């Protein structure tokens, strides 16, 4: 048996998340179906993490074991020919039998994109959350440093989680902005929050973003972020931001 590791991208718009679910179209189902069409095998495709419905991935890492003798350099082309157009395999390699995409992951990076403009961008509408009014980006930035390091992130985790340990370490939390040539002013039109950590709780990034949006709207102050973090209470944080703005950006091993 060979253990194969792939880097894949997908547009999660039409999928009910990554993980297989009864009577639902998921990324894992499509991957396993493609492998079955190619080799005749029923495999379990392991991923570095489960993305929710509507969430995207730029560089998700997966692996599975196969008895197929197809050369590794032909796997991506063969899979892509059997996958829908919104899922693409980019790289493939043979790895030791012990490699496990989720258990071996050391750091993950997520990017959440907000369109801060009166009108949405038709070309990016599936990949960013549209916020039609002005956001105070500097106030949002000022709220970020307290999230760095090791903390109990209970306040930024859905109550529907089965994780007892809510302690995670964030290595980087930063915000990038850009203007839009379609707009007549040089105001910020797109805000990206980039977060790197050793792991993430269920909806953690989206709840952080929902809280940041309230800070940007002036409904909360920058200093509220530390108070919310220390409260360890989901009710203290902002709403869960919509899924379409979130992308799994990178996984490091």
Image (spheres, rainbow, N blue to C red):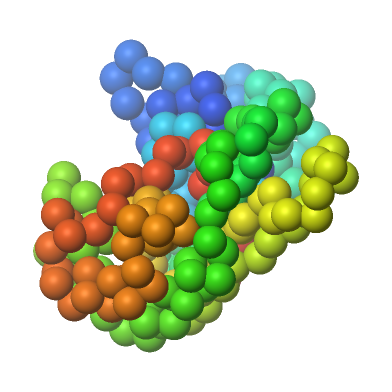
Q: Please, is residue 236 above or below residue 34 in the view?
A: below
Name the quarter where the C terminus is drawn. bottom right
Q: Quadrant of residue 167?
A: bottom left
Return the x and y of residue 18 as percentages of the image width and height.
Answer: 44, 37
Q: Quadrant of residue 231?
A: bottom left
As rendered, which of 218 and 78 lies closer to the eye? 218
In the drawing, does residue 101 fall left or right of residue 20? right
In the drawing, does residue 15 fall left or right of residue 86? left
- Which residue lies at the image location 29% right of the left edge and 19% below the top edge? 22
- Which residue lies at the image location 22% right of the left edge and 75% below the top edge? 227
Return the x and y of residue 49 as percentages of the image width and height.
Answer: 42, 52
Q: Please, is residue 233 above or below residue 138 in the view?
A: above
Q: Would residue 240 be visible to someone looking at this image?
A: yes
Return the x and y of residue 250 as percentages of the image width and height.
Answer: 60, 61
As rendered, which of 27 and 97 lies closer to the eye? 27
As rendered, which of 167 and 191 lies closer to the eye? 191
- Which residue lies at the image location 53% right of the left edge and 61% below the top edge? 136
- Which residue lies at the image location 14% right of the left edge and 69% below the top edge? 232
Return the x and y of residue 143 as percentages of the image width and height.
Answer: 42, 74
């Amino acid at each position: 048996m060979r253990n194969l590791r792939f880097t894949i991208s997908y547009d999660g718009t039409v999928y009910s998340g990554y993980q297989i679910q009864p009577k639902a179209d998921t990324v894992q189902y499509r991957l396993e179906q493609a492998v079955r069409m190619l080799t005749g095998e029923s495999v379990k495709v392991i991923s570095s993490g489960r993305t929710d419905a509507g969430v995207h991935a730029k560089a998700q890492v997966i692996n599975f074991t196969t008895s197929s003798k197809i050369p590794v350099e032909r796997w991506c082309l063969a899979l892509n020919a059997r996958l829908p157009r919104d899922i693409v395999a980019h790289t493939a390699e043979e790895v030791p039998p012990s490699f496990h995409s989720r258990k071996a992951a050391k750091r993950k990076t997520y990017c959440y994109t907000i369109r801060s403009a009166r009108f949405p961008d038709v070309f990016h509408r599936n990949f960013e959350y549209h916020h039609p009014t002005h956001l105070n980006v500097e106030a949002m930035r000022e709220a970020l440093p307290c999230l760095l390091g090791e903390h109990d992130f209970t306040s930024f985790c859905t109550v529907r989680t089965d994780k007892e340990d809510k302690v995670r370490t964030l290595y980087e939390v930063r915000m990038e902005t850009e203007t839009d040539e379609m707009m007549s002013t040089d105001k910020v039109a797109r805000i990206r929050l980039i977060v790197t950590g050793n792991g993430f709780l269920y909806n953690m990034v989206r709840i952080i973003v929902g809280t940041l949006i309230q800070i940007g709207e002036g409904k909360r102050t920058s200093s509220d972020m530390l108070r919310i973090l220390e409260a360890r209470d989901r009710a203290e944080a902002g709403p869960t931001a919509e899924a379409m703005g979130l992308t799994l950006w990178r996984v490091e091993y």
